[in-house]
Amino acid sequence: MSAIITEPLFYAVAIPAVILLGLAKGGLAGIGIASTPLLALYLPPLEAAALILPTLITQDMISLYVYRRNWDARNLKIMLPGAAIGMALAWLLASHMSDAVIRITVGAIGLTFTAHTWLRRKAIEPRQATTAGGVFWGGVSGFTSFMTQAGGPPFQVYVLPQRLPKLTLVGTTTVFFAIVNLMKIGPYFALAQFTAKNFATSLLLLPIAVLGNFAGIWLVRRIPNDTFYRIAYTLLFCISLALFWQGIRAVI
């Protein structure tokens, strides 16, 4: 029995997946959401989420160092307790809830949010978000992140309208998901999603992911603030549409 996954089909989806993860962890928030759906073409979705978790945590450490001075404490204090609740619920329901339903839900949230934003005629002004909303969207983000590593759209629904400075948004996203990813380790072990073979495969893919990480960091620092937000909303829409369509196809 091989110590790592050797099938070419796996690497055809895994290499693009970890590159997307690297770019996302570097600061191009949102595009990493496609990584688990890509891997889920080969592995069961929850197992795919567990396989890339060691890579995610390593990338988190790099990004935490880079953005260590750029994060918003208020958003983290509000959203992380909600994320813990959402992850606990996901743990309880992991073996009972269809991945298609999760994808449809996450996709619908992202599509509704971006459509509402783009259809507004007046300029979008920064606004202070409510505590209750932060706990709720933190919970949804924790739930979907646990199930499919798709916590980005719910997180962005709450944070993007605040129009935080670009690096503050990236840093806050980095800290939030670094903590959420660490919180997954115990439940994934309890659900028997980690295997020696998958862990070794994850380590093999790590150098590619780290290169993507630094590419994302380089790009974020060179993109103007308004352009960054246009990209963030566009990525959120495209990814949400892809998730929604994947879920619908699985149901029908």
Image (cartoon, rainbow, N blue to C red):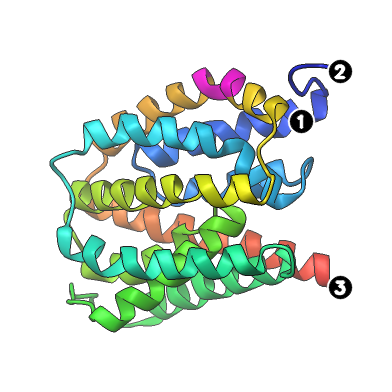
Check the image and name the residue furthest to the front.
190
Residue 252: mark in rendering:
3
Picture coordinates of residue 88 (x, y %)?
A: 51, 66
Please give left or right for residue 12 compared with residue 177 in the image: right
Residue 110: mark in rendering:
none
| Dot 2: element | loop
| Dot 3: element | loop
Give the residue drawn at x 61%, y 58%: 147
Amino acid at dot 2: Met
Q: Tell me if residue 203 comes above or below residue 194 in the rendering.
A: above
| Dot 1: element | helix
Give the residue drawn at x 56%, y 52%: 187
Cα–Cα span, label 1 and label 3: 26 Å
Amino acid at dot 3: Ile
Q: Which residue is denoted by mark 2 in the rendering?
A: 1
Picture coordinates of residue 235 (x, y %)?
A: 47, 55
| Residue 47 image-quadrant placement | top right
Asked if residue 237 lies in the magenta stretch, the reply is no
